[in-house]
Image (cartoon, rainbow, N blue to C red):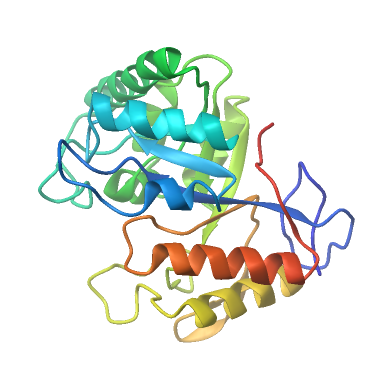
Amino acid sequence: MAYHARAGAVLAGQTEEPMQIDLNSDLGEGYGPWEMGSDAALLQVVTSANVACGGHAGDPEVMYRTLQLAVARGVVVGAHPGYADREGFGRRVIPMAAAEVTRMVAAQVGALMGVARLAGAEVAYVKPHGALANLAADDRAVAEAVLEALPRGMAVLAISGTVLELAARARGIAVFSEIFADRAYLPNGRLMPRSQPGAVLHAAEEAAARLVAFLDSGRMPVAGAAPIPLAAHSVCVHGDSPGALAMARLIRDRLQAAGVTLAPFLP
């Protein structure tokens, strides 16, 4: 099993102990009386929770309830800001100047931090959502705009192998690499667009088997090419996907059976 210690990442050819990785999910993505996913149940499975901040989803009450549950379960909390596009669930790019992106992210992260204070929680990191995350993966200006909004000392959870990682390191910001259990990959390491067939993995057994194989080799299967090396501190199971809870539970079971300890990438 190839793993590079608690503060490291899964990488091909590295075999240090202990074997440990984080399991995260995007939560708090309901709004008003409308619920998305099984947040309470998922918070019994994951070790980190990316909580929507009122942009693509979420509102003060949903944030508060999600944060309270996370505190009760001992789950580390991160902010999950995205384009203010509820109709598109933050999965459409909204044309914005870099400075506007910074202010949007700052407002959403600040909102979650304010509610977290009331819930007795601490926001430890930021993970951009959806189209914002995908754009920050390749567009340096957008990546820098996201980082500019972060409070001092806050870490970043970024898609593995992206510009956002490089920009964070250049600024001296703690950055952790994320892979996705339920998404297909392209040969360049980016996520396959959701518009393409097979972009989302729905079969829990398939996703779990792929993940265990990845942790063993450090290489991720991709569409139409040989597997590619990726680093990983954290594995995401999308909370809004059908069967997310069953997939998260199975992945947790399979990783533990393989000798991997599930623990947050931040204390």
Which residue shows up at 18% across the image and 51% down it? 92
> Would you place residue 252 above or below residue 114 in this image?
below
Position in image of residue 154 (x %, y %): 54, 23
Which residue shows up at 53% across the image and 29% down it? 71
In the rendered image, is residue 75 in sight? no
Which residue shows up at 23% across the image and 52% down it? 91
Q: Is residue 90 left or right of residue 158?
A: left
Q: Quadrant of residue 99?
A: top left
Q: Is residue 144 left or right of residue 86?
A: right
In the rendered image, is residue 7 in sight? yes
Position in image of residue 105 (x %, y %): 32, 26
Look at the image and tell me in which quarter the C terminus lies.
top right
Q: How many marks?
A: 0
Look at the image and tell me in which quarter the N terminus lies.
bottom right
Q: Is residue 107 left or right of residue 31?
A: right
Q: Residue furthest left?
A: 87
Q: Nearer the viewer, residue 249 or 21?
A: 249
Q: Residue furthest right?
A: 16
Position in image of residue 183 (x %, y %): 42, 68
Q: Is residue 58 left or right of residue 169?
A: left
Which residue shows up at 74% across the image and 74% down it? 217
Position in image of residue 211 (x %, y %): 61, 71
Q: Quadrant of residue 144?
A: top left
